[in-house]
Image: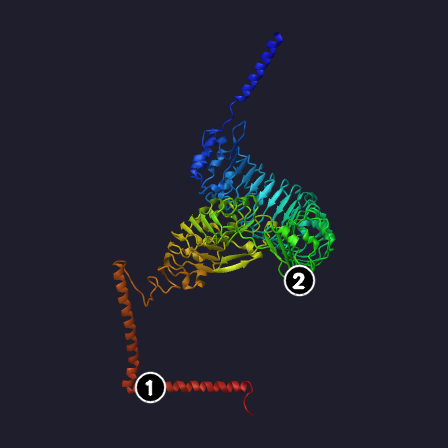
């Protein structure tokens, strides 16, 4: 009985303890920090497209708010992650950050901080515990501070010793990279890509011993040699210096790399620079390298045999250089290679089974010879390779004359180019039938291939099937069909080209498209779209900073061709399609005004909004679109003046503002002086000035000075000006007549004056004749030309 009671007591104690644990009140956020967050929300008048105030940051416990995390024990806010791309207004102050002193993670990517100016540095410095700072896409312009009590020459302007991740990409910094960044010795990731940094990098990264990822791509004003990496960067895995203006060789850069870097570096991207020289054998020391991109430089010479030492290499891009020589036999040791791009060089020689037999993981190959058949595939006819390709582009490489078996066994191909490869054979029907269901692009031109192709598939009048959202699409081109329904909102983030023109789509332009960072061609012209142009179109990252390499270059190899309406005509683009930046919404039923936000697309080269029902003014800041080559706003109902800033469009070669209701003097500065075709402005009866025949008020030719005391009506002043002009003309005529007859009349009447005048003229004539004769004799004697 006693043991039973003891057991009961023990069980009750366990139940009590567990109930105490369950009922322990959770730690709520600290009131001062809640007030700081509310100050951020209310004080900056932030709005959200889905009603921020109704759905976010409600209730007493700020630790339960979206994007907020707190320490479970202390209740301090440790994480602030705000959905910046949903904000519609500029943030004017960061003073509220001082109330979040325990913050470890701050992500305000996409929030417009241009109104804060340089003081963002001082605000961030108040967060001593900060570990991650993400301020990408924030329109920041300064990496120095305007506060008088901060030493601008100090190497520790940003004094955050605990900071591990610093992301300042896609901003507008336009100075040299500040040296104080190397004092952030805890950094593991530093991203300064896609800004306007300039000048040479004059310091070493020696202090950043914990650095794992360094991104500096897309700063096209950075010049000089590659910076030194002679320090102890033993943890560096990713190094991206692409799309800059670095010059010189890479011998010293690779030669100075420490032994530990050789073991750690996994990704090296130096593409789109001005680097030159031979690729040194020291490249082979980077034994852990998985991704290597040296494309679009000026490297020459052969591919070094030491490349075989890169046993982990998965992606190799040496395209668009000046490399010559043969592909080394050791190339076949790259057994993990997946992507191989060697086009745009001067490679030559023979490719045998030795270079190919161990490439078991190879999926994507682009190899184009610059000289006809300078590269020859010399493999036995019935050789079966160990790889199954998905993309194969061969151009001017000799593979024929028979259609080789190593091509016929490629059953997973989606993109095929076999252009000018010397095949004189019948197309294998079994092979073509095998790939026809998945192929999206095929080019067999400039060969002598015979046989029949299957009938072209015709799409039914098959809305776009929603099942496509399960595909990883990079380019979507369904133009010129009979597709209908609403535009798909599910377009994936990787899409770079979206062409749906000349269909029967209706509805509005989906706002979800505004979050496509890589999109640089948007063409939905000639449909039945209605509604307004979304103001969030100004968020297109690729059209703000340039499309470039927003994704790794092996995704940027365009194989299709597209006809783009630009510069007033249709132009076909092939390999240069990746550099085209276009928005074409023409010939729909769009209404409302042109959103001012669209002027932030500074990398856009073609904007066509013609043939809609747009109203309001042309955005006054349209001059910000400095790379715009084509602007077509014709056949709308736009009113108001032509903005003065339009004269800043120095790249403009095609302009059409016809058939609107614009009213102003036509600007004539800079590039607009060359656009002197009157048809550009026709159909705007209230426009005046050159090149239109309609003159503006006050353009009449002025024949003399006018004076005004500032009184009287405009009509009185106009009458006064006309009277003064008439009297000025009459006085000139009278003066001429009086002056002429004052001289001529006197000579006719007074004989002595007439005699003296004509004697004077004869005397002058004789003197001139004598001077000419003397000069002639002198020159004749001087040059020995007189007769003996």
Give the image's coloring scheme.
Answer: rainbow
Query: In the image shown, does 397 or 181 lie closer to the viewer?
Result: 397
Residue 548 is situated, as x and y percent measured from the top left of the image, at 56, 51
Quadrant of the image containing the N terminus: top right
Q: Secondary structure at mark 1?
A: helix
Query: In the image shown, does 250 or 200 lie closer to the viewer?
Result: 250
Query: In the image shown, does 47 or 33 lie closer to the viewer?
Result: 47
Disc 1 target residue: 756
- Of marks 1 and 2, which one's residue comes earlier in the chain? 2
Disc 2 target residue: 372
Residue 360 is situated, as x and y percent measured from the top left of the image, at 70, 47
Q: Note whether 173 is above or below 74 in the view shown.
A: below
Q: Which corner quadrant of the image does residue 402 belong to?
A: bottom right
Q: Secondary structure at mark 2?
A: loop
Residue 223 visible:
no
* Left or right side of 197 for 699: left
């Amino acid at each position: 009985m006693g043991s039973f009671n003891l057991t009961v007591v023990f069980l009750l104690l366990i139940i009590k303890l567990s109930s105490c644990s369950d009922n322990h009140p959770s730690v709520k956020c600290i009131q001062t920090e809640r007030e700081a967050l509310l100050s951020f929300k209310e004080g900056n008048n932030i709005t959200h497209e889905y009603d921020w105030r109704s759905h976010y940051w409600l209730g007493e416990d700020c630790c339960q708010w979206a994007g907020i995390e707190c320490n479970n024990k202390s209740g301090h806010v440790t994480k602030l992650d705000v959905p910046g791309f949903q904000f519609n207004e500029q943030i004017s102050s960061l003073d509220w950050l001082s109330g979040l002193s325990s913050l470890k993670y701050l992500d305000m990517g996409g929030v417009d901080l241009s109104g804060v100016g340089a003081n963002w540095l001082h605000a961030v410095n108040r967060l001593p515990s900060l570990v991650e700072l993400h301020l990408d896409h924030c329109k920041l312009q300064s990496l120095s501070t305007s506060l008088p009590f901060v030493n601008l020459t100090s190497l520790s302007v940003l004094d955050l010793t605990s900071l591990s991740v610093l992301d300042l990409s896609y901003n507008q910094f336009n100075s040299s990279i500040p040296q104080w960044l190397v004092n952030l010795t805890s950094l593991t990731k530093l991203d300064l890509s896609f800004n306007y940094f300039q000048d040479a990098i004059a310091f070493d990264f020696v202090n950043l011993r914990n650095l794992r990822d360094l991104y500096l791509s897309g700063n096209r004003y950075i010049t000089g040699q590659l910076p030194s990496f002679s320090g102890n960067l033993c943890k560096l895995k990713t190094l991206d210096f692409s799309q800059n203006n670095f010059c010189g060789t890479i011998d010293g850069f690779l030669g100075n790399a420490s032994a530990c870097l050789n073991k750690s570096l996994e990704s090296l991207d130096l593409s789109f620079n001005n680097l030159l020289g031979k690729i040194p054998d020291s490249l082979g020391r980077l034994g852990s390298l998985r991704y290597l991109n040296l494309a679009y430089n000026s490297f020459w010479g052969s591919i070094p045999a030491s490349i075989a030492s890169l046993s982990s290499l998965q992606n190799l891009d040496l395209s668009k250089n000046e490399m010559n020589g043969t592909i080394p036999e050791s190339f076949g040791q790259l057994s993990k290679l997946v992507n191989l791009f060697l086009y745009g060089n001067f490679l030559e020689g023979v490719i045998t089974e030795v270079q190919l037999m161990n490439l078991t993981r190879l999926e994507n190959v682009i190899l184009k010879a610059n000289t006809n058949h300078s590269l020859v595939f010399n493999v036995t006819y019935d050789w079966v390779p160990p790889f199954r390709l998905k993309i194969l582009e061969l151009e001017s490489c000799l593979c024929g004359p028979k259609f080789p078996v190593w091509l016929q066994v490629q059953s997973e191909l989606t993109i095929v180019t076999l252009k000018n490869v010397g095949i004189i054979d019948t197309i294998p029907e079994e092979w073509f039938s095998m790939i026809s269901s998945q192929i999206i692009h095929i080019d067999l031109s400039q060969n002598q291939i015979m046989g029949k192709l299957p009938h072209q598939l015709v799409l039914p009048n098959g809305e776009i099937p929603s099942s496509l959202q399960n595909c990883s699409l990079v380019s979507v081109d369904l133009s010129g069909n009979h597709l209908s329904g609403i535009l798909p909102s599910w377009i994936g983030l990787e899409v770079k080209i979206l062409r749906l023109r000349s269909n029967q789509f209706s509805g509005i332009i989906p706002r979800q498209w505004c979050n496509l960072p890589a999109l640089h061609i948007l063409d939905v012209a000639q449909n039945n779209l209605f509604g307004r142009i979304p103001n969030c179109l100004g968020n297109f990252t690729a059209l703000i900073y340039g499309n470039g390499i927003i994704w790794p270059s092996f995704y940027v190899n365009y194989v299709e061709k597209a006809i783009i309406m630009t510069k007033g005509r249709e132009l076909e683009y092939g390999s240069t399609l990746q550099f085209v930046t276009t928005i074409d919404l023409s010939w729909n039923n769009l209404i409302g005004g042109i959103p001012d936000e669209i002027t932030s697309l500074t990398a856009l080269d073609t904007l066509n909004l013609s043939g809609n029902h747009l109203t309001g003014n042309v955005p006054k800041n349209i001059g910000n679109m400095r790379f715009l080559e084509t602007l077509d706003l014709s056949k709308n109902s736009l009113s108001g003046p032509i903005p003065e800033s339009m004269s800043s469009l120095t790249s403009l070669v095609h302009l059409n503002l016809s058939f609107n209701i614009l009213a102003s003097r036509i600007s004539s500065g800079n590039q607009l002086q060359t656009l002197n075709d009157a048809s550009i402005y026709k159909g705007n009866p209230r426009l005046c000035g050159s090149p239109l025949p309609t003159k503006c008020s006050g353009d009449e030719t002025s024949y003399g000075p006018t004076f005004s005391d500032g009184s009287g009506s405009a009509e009185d002043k106009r009458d006064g000006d006309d009277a003064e002009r008439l009297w000025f003309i009459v006085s000139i005529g009278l003066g001429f007549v009086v002056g002429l007859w004052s001289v001529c009349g006197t000579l006719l009447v007074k004989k002595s004056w007439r005699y003296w005048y004509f004697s004077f003229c004869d005397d002058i004539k004789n003197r001139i004749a004598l001077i000419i004769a003397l000069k002639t004799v002198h020159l004749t004697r001087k040059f020995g030309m007189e007769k003996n």
